[in-house]
Image: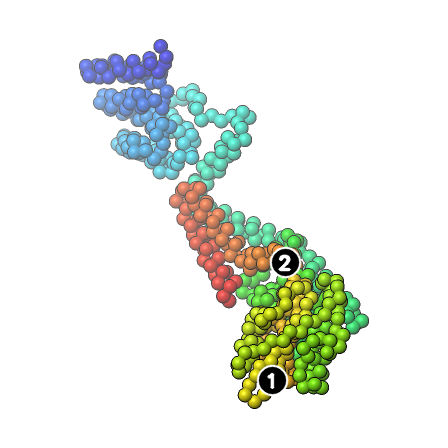
Amino acid sequence: MSNEERGSQLFSEAIRSLEDGDNARAEQLLIGALNNLDKKHHLAILSLKSLVTISSNKSDFDAAIDWSLKLLESQTGALGHTHADVSRTVMNIATMCETLGKPEIANQVKELHQYASAAERAQKARQVKNIRTTAKSAQTEEEPTEDQFDEKAATLPEYLARQSQNWRGSLTQMNGLTVSIIFLVALGLVCGSLVALKFCYSDEHNRNFSQPRPRMDGTTGPLRYTSADNRVEAQFVLPTKVEIDIDTKKRTFPYNCYGYDITEIGDLMIRSPLEKEYWLMRNPDGLVDEAGRAYLHERLADRQLLSHILNVADMAERFYKKNKRYPDNVREIGDFSYDNPYTLRRDNPLIQIVTVPGHRSPQAFLTGLSKGELWPGEATLYPGCINIAHVSHRTNMSVPETLVIHGCNGWSRFFTQSTGQPYYLVFERGARIEPHSPKLTFLNDISRVCVLDISPAFANLALLLIKARFVLLFGLLFIASYAVAGLFSTDATKKVAFWFGTVYLVIALACAYLAWFY
């Protein structure tokens, strides 16, 4: 017969003795049942409840308290601290202790139940045993519990789980001030790491941009980028300064260049979110901003192609002054073949005749070109092409003529001007028509210029993450705070974590507004 079977038999005999009114024999049988049953067994819990009742009936309240503490230990191990039976046992013990003039034991039991959690089950079970020993005022031999943990024999997941339990148990005993200090220290570590990265930051990229280089005119000077229409020019004159000449008005800004160096994160993160940054992305053609404005390197092939376009326009204008019409074929104005810097072949500008039907003005036609549209029948675009449209439109009085010239860069896309629109030249009756160019005001409120020196394939994504860097930082802190509130369930930890999380969320929303709407 196993111990469990023996214990069950003794429990049944004890119940019969209670029914017969033999409480003394029932008490002995119940104790024997406890010695044979596991303390988490439901019959062991029932036996302890019966022993509490028997001791109370014969006014042996010290024994009743002792059996009640054993009952609390068994219920805690079997049912958990949040079970209703455990709560009732706790209150019964507290009532008996207060009645017998033992308030210290009552307070210990109440506090034990109030701050207990499922993660502390083993630790609190040992505390129950210590309280029982104090109440009995007798030294007993310590019994081994099933919660004994052998670190040497434990696997790595078991060891990590135990350490997590220990950390939770330690944190649940802390008050709100202590938890707040821990959160502030964690925030300080994050900020300190960013400051440390800033101290490690070097301006290597900046020095590369400001290093003097030979220019097309034979002189040596700072690196210079210019828009296709020559309205905006940027020169990186110092490792920390860039001069931007916009509509002949020169302004100087601080600038920083960022690439793949992790220390540059520190420089980015310690900047004020109130700064208004003007971001430029570096690509093989030059620099491009978020609005599509392109600034071309003065020594790249793009500048050479633009000079060919201007030469063709100049000769076409001379041809009109002499013949009172625009050419229908490029050979009429001379040999303008050129070495295409992108296809590495000999190329020629292509002139096409486009007639505007009826008596309509060509303004709608020109408006479409300003939006990047092609004219009817225009040849396929390819890198380095120069396309010319000889546009005629009949009116009641005359047949005025218009000439449109534009070209493509190495990506088969139109050059862009300082307004972000496609760059093209328009001539009417031998005179160049200057397009409506609004005043350039995009540099009025900026605090500094930032250059993103990353490959074009990832530049847009990297720029999006950089602009949202403060949102991401405080968003992650917000998520971490709420994760701590869910991981550690004490009231103090929850309140502090929710408070910090709310502050981080408000800051993240404010940074989002500053990044996209300020």
Q: Quadrant of residue 113?
A: top left
Q: Residue at x 67, y 66 (%)?
A: 409
Residue furthest left as drawn? 20
| Mark seen at residue 383 | none
Q: Looking at the image, tell me whether mark 1 or mark 2 is earlier in sequence order.
A: 1
Q: Secondary structure at mark 2?
A: helix
Q: Residue at x 36, y 22 (%)?
A: 39
The dot on residue 400 is 1
Q: Is residue 376 above or below residue 260?
A: below
Evaluate whether residue 167 shows in this view. Answer: yes
Task: Specify whether 94 is left or right of 311.
Answer: left
Give whichever of 411, 362 is nearer the camera.
Answer: 362
- In space, the residues marked 1 and 2 are separated at their CA atoms by 44 Å
**Residue type at tag 1:** Pro
Which corner quadrant holds the N terminus? top left
Q: Does 129 sit left or right of 456 as displayed?
A: left
10 Å crowding of disc 1: few (<14), some (14-19), many (20+): some
Q: Choose top left, top right, bottom left or bottom right for residue 347.
A: bottom right
Question: Can you give x and y, in whole percent of width and height, for residue 443 in the image?
Answer: 59, 72
Identify which residue is drawn at 63% across, 67% down: 379
To which residue does mark 2 refer? Answer: 456
